[in-house]
Image (cartoon, rainbow, N blue to C red):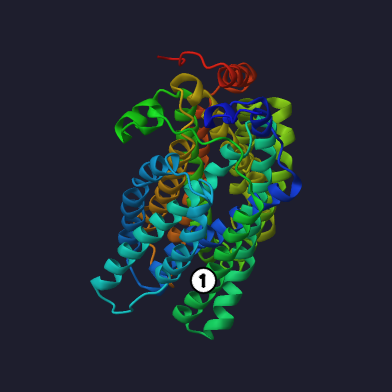
Amino acid sequence: MSIPLSKRQRETSPEHLLAAEARPGVVERLGFSLGDLASNLTWSTITSYLLFFYTDVAFIAAAAAGTLLLLARVLDAAIDPLIGVILDRTHTRFGRARPYLIFGAPVLAILTVLTFWTPGTGGPFDLVWAYITFILVGIAYSVVNVPYGSLMTMVTRDSASRMSIAGFRNAGATIGLLVISVGTAPLVGLLGQGNMRLGYILTVSIYAVVGMLLFWVVCFLVKERIPFESNARTQGSLKRSLRALLKNKYWVSIFFAALFQFARLGAITGGAIYYASNVLHNTQAVGLVLLAFAISGLLSSFVAPPFVKWLGHRRGIIISLVANVMFSLAMILFASNLWGFIAVFFVASLAGGIGFVALPALVSDSVEFQDLITGQRSEGLLYSGYSFATKVGTAIGGAMLAWGLSTIGYSPGETSTSVSTGVATIFIGLPIVLSLLQIICLAFYSLQQKLPEITGALNARGVAPVSEAGN
């Protein structure tokens, strides 16, 4: 008669460990891509159009809008670590991450729509409404996106598989940006019939509903394989968990690299509409700029995995950022030439897109190091920190853009030579500075070559538990 295995014995059995090393199939990887597509129907709409919506539809002053973007985002992003800690303690019949997607997606959809509605009073209540909705949609996005992002660490421990999943995820994110780039302006015009307030709320409603449905599809396609560990080590205080997190030097390096990377994203996607209007003098060109950015990102999804595999994670990303800086400088030569600018901008964005693919996979790799030094995987906490960096980084980029617009005297509907020059300087120069800062951060990352040894040690500890490393 067979003797039933204990929960710990089942989780450390060779069969379970092999499941953890399993490589997800194409359908499952496509499921991940749908999650990022859904995320970007919310996030890319916010980063690309919300500042313009505030300044040119809700008529909130640019400086006030910039301060709003930064303060509100920092406030709601501060809740990300708490969501991560709660996720690390979640264990339900639906799984660990999936319940947040199932029940959080409808809330995110509703709040996304409300964020693109304005009372239209022309007074301070419009700004108050903007603060309230922007903070709430950020919290709802975290409740859904932190668990979704953590799914990668729950599916497999294989680093190559994670990089492949990251490629699929970036493809989905880029398709989302592509939809936003090509579809938003025409839809706002078509549905609003000259009424931008109506056009925006109807367009965003479509995006929100589709995004909600896609998150539900992710729940159906993606399987969690890494076992849930419920023991005293995972039940410590938030303060203790954060202290342990800061011991992970590789994660800290990734955190700051992501912060500057998404600040660059916020400056580019938020600034495109101002560049098109004031430098290219063609409001419809915003679609071309964002389309070039989206297609470059899609190509990065396929280029990045073999590129960083060939050169190594750190070297590959740094070389791509150096190329991004060089081609960004070349954009100055074609600043007011539409097709020349688009061509060089596309190449610069293709190089800069490598990091957007690779960094989420590096976060997953840092989970293994966290497990080694603390005995805790803390997937939710580590990814929540990355989510914090993406949200605050995007807000910093948007705020710096808005403050820059205020500094150069930007006023809706008015264009001058000085404003045109100022917009070009901000749109081209700010991302260059942020890329250089990202390079400095990644110079401290050197985890890749140590991963095989770390994974071997973790597997050995799983079969025959040993004392915790680092204690």
- Decide: few, some or many residues near mark 1? Use Cα within 10 Å; few <14, some 14-19, many ≥20: many
- Rendered image quadrant of residue 11: top right
Residue 370, x across and y down, in percent = 48, 25
Which one is in front, 386 or 331?
386
The residue furthest front is: 1
Label 1: which residue? 204
Q: Quadrant of the N terminus?
A: top right
The residue closer to the viewer here, 260 or 2, is 2
Question: Which quadrant does the C terminus fall into?
Answer: top left
Q: What residue is at 61 percent from the left and 23 percent from the top?
A: 448
- The residue shown at (34%, 27%) is 243
Describe residue 324's horizontal placement relative to residue 377 as left or right.
right
Q: Quadrant of residue 464?
A: top right
Q: Is 239 displayed left or right of 9 in the figure? A: left
Would residue 122 be visible to someone looking at this image?
A: yes
Under mark 1, the amino acid is Val
Residue 229 or residue 448, whichever sits in front: 229
Q: Tell me: residue 30, above or below residue 413.
A: above
Residue 132 spot, x, y in % from top left: 31, 64
Compared with 168, 156 (above or below) is above
Place of residue 21 in the rendered image (x, y in percent of width and height, measured from the top left): 67, 31
Q: Secondary structure at mark 1?
A: helix
Q: Can the viewer see residue 293?
A: no
Q: Which residue occupies the foreground of this view, 460 or 165?
A: 460
| In the image, farthest residue toward the left | 124
Give x and y (percent) for residue 67: 31, 55
